Image (cartoon, helix red, strand yellow):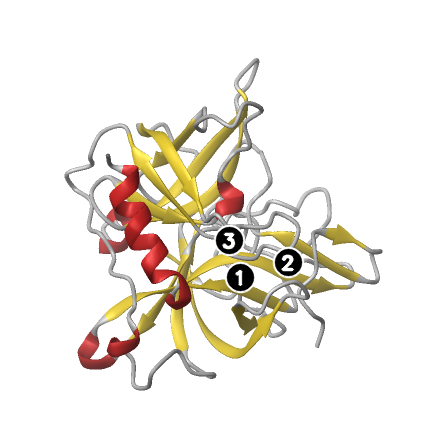
Amino acid sequence: MNSIRPLVILSMAGLFMAPASLAAVSGSSREKIIGGLEIEASHPLTRSVVALINIVEPEPEEAFEVCTASFLTDRVLLTAAHCLPETDDGGEPQALSIKIGVDAYDDGPRLTVDRGLAHPDYDSTTYVSDVAVIRLAESYSEAKPLKLARPQDLRGASLSRMSRFQAVGFGRSNAGRGENESYEGLGRMRTVDLQSIDFVSSSTSEELLIQVDMNHGRGFCEGDSGGPALLKAGRGKSGIVGVASTFESRGPKDCNQFGYYTNVLPHLEWIKRAMREIVK
């Protein structure tokens, strides 16, 4: 098994690892998530999970990066730290918004994000602590916030290997790298059931990431960054147990080997503090 490594392309025949966001494109697709299903416009998750839009070129034709975020309250959302745009002066993110609904590219309204807090231990080269909270300029009254999974909600003291969960995101629907397929399906809300197979740490941290097997045509890809892994806990409860972060690939395709979620459980206290701080 390959260890967690920084974003790097070794060769087309070697290991490719990337954040599961990126990709500024226009247009949309009705294709499925890799191995999963589209979410219908009437599904309750459309009020819980949204596309996170970062405009990188407003003119002459808007281009933007796509990530995914989840409502924790009607104004605060959870996402990946690498989805927050970098600012030269260290100020608040600019040109960042969320898009409600199943399609990031339709003409529906966007809600402005006016503040973001990345985990203080986040490392952009190793993706350690790749988790962040963002604040909307105004509350969204129709939001259906998701709960964070807690150790007491689970069968044991913590998440176990072979746990099953539901992944949700706005990422691309294929694993190709060709010019016409690199961003196929990006921007459409989809879901897929995945299974954790291991916990792995980066070479610079003991923090354990949730590893999922994507060798069999089921997984997440660019655009799904920040999206939730919803663990089905006891008594029908579900909660966010992971935040989509990075993936590994081999050969001429992407997103076809292993995916990695930031484990929410070790970060629960920070997330709760950040939720309080960001609304002050």
Looking at marks 3 and 2 on the same chain, the residue that comes earlier in the sequence is marked by: 3
The image's mark for residue 130 is: 3
Q: Could you tell me residue 109's position as x and y percent?
A: 30, 27
Q: Secondary structure at mark 1?
A: loop
Foreground mark, 3 or 1, reads: 3
Alpha carbon distance from label 1 to label 2: 7 Å
Q: Residues within 10 Å of mark 3 (few under 14, many from 20)?
A: many
Give left or right: position of 209 versus 78: right
Q: Could you tell me residue 244's position as x and y percent?
A: 48, 58
Number of numbered discs overlaid on the protein picture:
3
Alpha carbon distance from label 3 to label 2: 23 Å
Q: Residue at point 64% right, 55% down? A: 126
Give left or right: position of 107 versus 181: left
Q: Could you tell me residue 49's position as x and y percent?
A: 32, 50
Alpha carbon distance from label 3 to label 1: 23 Å
| Circle 1 residue | 34
Q: Quadrant of the C terminus?
A: top left
Foreground mark, 3 or 2, reads: 3
Looking at marks 3 and 1 on the same chain, the residue that comes earlier in the sequence is marked by: 1
- The reply to whether discs 1 and 2 touch (Cβ–Cβ < 8 Å) is yes
Q: Please, what is the three-letter code of the amino acid marked with disc 3? A: Asp
User: Is residue 91 in sight in this rendering?
Assistant: yes
Q: Secondary structure at mark 3?
A: loop
Q: Residues within 10 Å of mark 2 (few under 14, many from 20)?
A: many
